[in-house]
Image: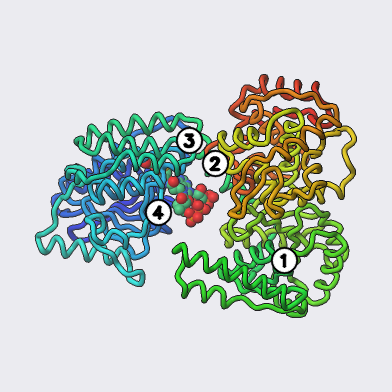
Amino acid sequence: MANENSQVSFFTQGKIGIIEINYPPVNALSQQVRQGLVEGVDKFNQDADIKAIVIRCKERTFIAGADIKEFGKPPTVPFLPDVVNHIEASEKPVIASLFGTSLGGGFEVALACHYRVAQKGAKVGLPEVNLGLIPGAGGTQRLPRVVGVGKALAMVTQGTHVKVEDFVDTNLIDEIFEIEVNLNEQTLQYVESLIESGSIEVKRLGFQTVEAGSLDWDAEIAKISKKARGKEAPLVAADVIRKTAELPILEGMKIEREAFLQLRESEQSAALRYVFGAEKSSAKHELNAQPVNVESVGIVGAGNMGSGIATAFLNAGYTVNLVEQTEDALRAGISRITKNFESNVKRGRMTQEKADNLLAGLTSSTEYASFSNCDLVIEAIFEDIEVKKSLFTQLDKVVKPDCILATNTSYLDIDQIASVVVDPGRVIGMHFFSPAHIMKLLEVVKAEKSSDIALATAMTVGKKLRKMSVLVGVCFGFAGNRMYTRYGREIQQMLLEGASIEQIDKAMTNWGMAMGPLAVQDLSGIDIGHNARSAQPFPEHDPGYFRAAASMVEQGRLGRKTSKGFYIYDEAGKASSDPEATRLIKSKAQDLGIAQKSFTDNEIVERALLALISEGLALYKEGIVQRLSDIDVIWLHGYGFPRHKGGPIFQARQKDLADLSGKFDELRASSSELIWPAVDLTLID
Ligand code: T1G
């Protein structure tokens, strides 16, 4: 006798059996849910009064996939492939009632059903590649049979969520209901009409054949490989689809399952699943306060950062008041913001109408008094402590008593800035990364006196901006830039020791970094970091400290903005090697008496990684970050660390700790304790 469980309930309505899943937050396919599906199908198949079966969910979405909480644990029966095949084998028609995001195993359950009805705007997808996996329960087999190999290949290898409306010309979705109507009622009415008309049938996708189509597989694979940028799963998915398109479904599912199980044991999948959890954790905090509502945001400074931050807030539906010192500077900033929206429209990310509506939320002024009604004011002005203190003194006089004041400073001491306002509790850091409307990382910086209300509000605002918000403490460069400085020091030390500019960048990008570290320097401007470091005492114990960058700045080679830096740039901005840059570095190394040696690419990557691991562990030990996984979230979303490598701390966890400790000892012995301080590796075991 089938019995319900706490996550799955059974009902009947006339001749229809209903299997209802209620397992918040996203009705994931836990063991109980899988068990309930099998038992529900059996129960209603044995009930002579039942003519059709509906699978539906409560709360926010139809099944959003396998239960990520069960990953890494020994698999439990019933296994999902058996569950979906059991549904498809049902003698009575099974109808899936879709809303929200039916993803991964959830979509595979829907594909095994004989009908799929959906609420308008509902999305479906097989995003397993984002977890380093491929669909493991028939997704690579049934989807091509209903939307064709080409569309299925794109969806599976890109892991995209697609609106159900996109499938109206296929048999994937049998009916789409308007959002205003009650989906459950509409679904039952739809099924009742099928039963009454006698047209209801058991339509098994798995028994259909795949339309051969004329796919140029080599071209497709080449495209997928380029897009994958070192990620394995998309290519495995393409290979499985290619191999099984002509096979009977059970044979195809066997091949799919083997490939899935192999990927599940891979380091890339472990990294991507870890990152999924790390990103969820980074949004959590123990702040003892409820966020206040923010609607009106003031931004001081309409330069690159200010206009990027304004774009991000306008994109999220906030009203923005932009203040600059002169009308000309305002015009330039507003032009940047407008161009950002034009680019969104051009790329099809939004309609012109949507862009116009969002831009309508922008006002501008040269007066700070125009901030009088703002809930939050963020400054993105010149990186100088006195300028910022003077600004906060003036803001403090014109904004509402509960208005939060945030600085976007990268390196300056927020406690000093806060010292000039009456209530320092309302002063925090909101450190955006350039370009602020594109980079997802947002460091919410807790200064000594920052209130929990201000910080909790900033974390909530970050979520609404769809940023990866991470709560960090105050130190030079907070978390990301402090690690970036340590990473940069190591890169430039290797330059002085004989590694070439090109070899370093190539080694790091081949390993997976989005850009070579020296190309990044040229992009952001070598003088930016140089000026910030020059405001600090020179570390006498480290004579080579960013001396390569200093040599560039001395020669006016600031990077792209001066057409030369570590590379030389033509009018089109194309980079090429410049022997003069190499000569400058060699000459500096000679002045410093630094012995030259050759490097392998692995040595370059390893030393750069060790520098990141060392600084990341120190940040955690000092309490600048709440958890070690925040270090990885920061480096994935602020600095282009490859997602399928998990992050610096994840990488440390893949290494033998004794071996790792030995490498740190060697580096400390060959330089100094000040450069390579002792690291507490027990933090990562
Ligand atoms: N399992 C368990 N919990 C999940 C979950 C899942 N699949 N997806 C999300 N959650 C939790 C999440 O941790 C958070 O929990 C809450 O739901 C809200 O998430 C065999 C093997 C569904 C689009 O990859 O893309 O099926 O922090 O903040 O922005 O082929 O979550 O609140 O406690 O992200 O509205 C395939 C992954 C799995 C979907 C919702 N499925 N999830 O986004 O909310 S592999 C996925 C998402 C698979 C089969 C294979 C998103 C979302 P908490 P959220 P959101």
Q: Is residue 481 left or right of residue 538?
A: left
Residue at 73% x, 59% y: name it.
Answer: 408
> Where is residue 226 drawn, in percent x and y?
44, 41
Write down the residue under mark 1: 378
> Where is residue 414 drawn, in percent x and y?
81, 57
Write down the residue under mark 4: 161
Is the residue marked by circle 4 packed among few (<14), some (14-19), or many (20+) residues within 10 Å? some
Find the distance from the CA under tag 4 to the CA under tag 1: 34 Å
Q: Which mark is residue 579?
A: none
Lower position in the chain sequence, tag 3 or tag 2:
3
Looking at the picture, does residue 312 appear above or below residue 329?
A: above
Quarter of the rendering occupied by the C terminus: top right
Q: Tell me the element at label 4.
A: strand
Q: Amino acid at mark 3?
A: Ser
Lower position in the chain sequence, tag 1 or tag 3:
3
> Where is residue 268 drawn, in percent x and y?
50, 34
Residue at 62% x, 28% y: name it.
Answer: 601
Find the distance from the CA under tag 4 to the CA under tag 2: 19 Å
Quarter of the rendering occupied by the N terminus: top left
Q: How is the image coloured?
A: rainbow
Q: Amino acid at mark 4?
A: His
Is the residue marked by circle 1 packed among few (<14), some (14-19), or many (20+) residues within 10 Å? many
Find the distance from the CA under tag 4 to the CA under tag 3: 20 Å
Q: Which mark is residue 643?
A: 2
Residue at 29% x, 50% y: name it.
Answer: 110
Q: Is residue 18 left or right of residue 340?
A: left
Lower position in the chain sequence, tag 4 or tag 1:
4
Q: How many marks?
A: 4
Write down the residue under mark 3: 269
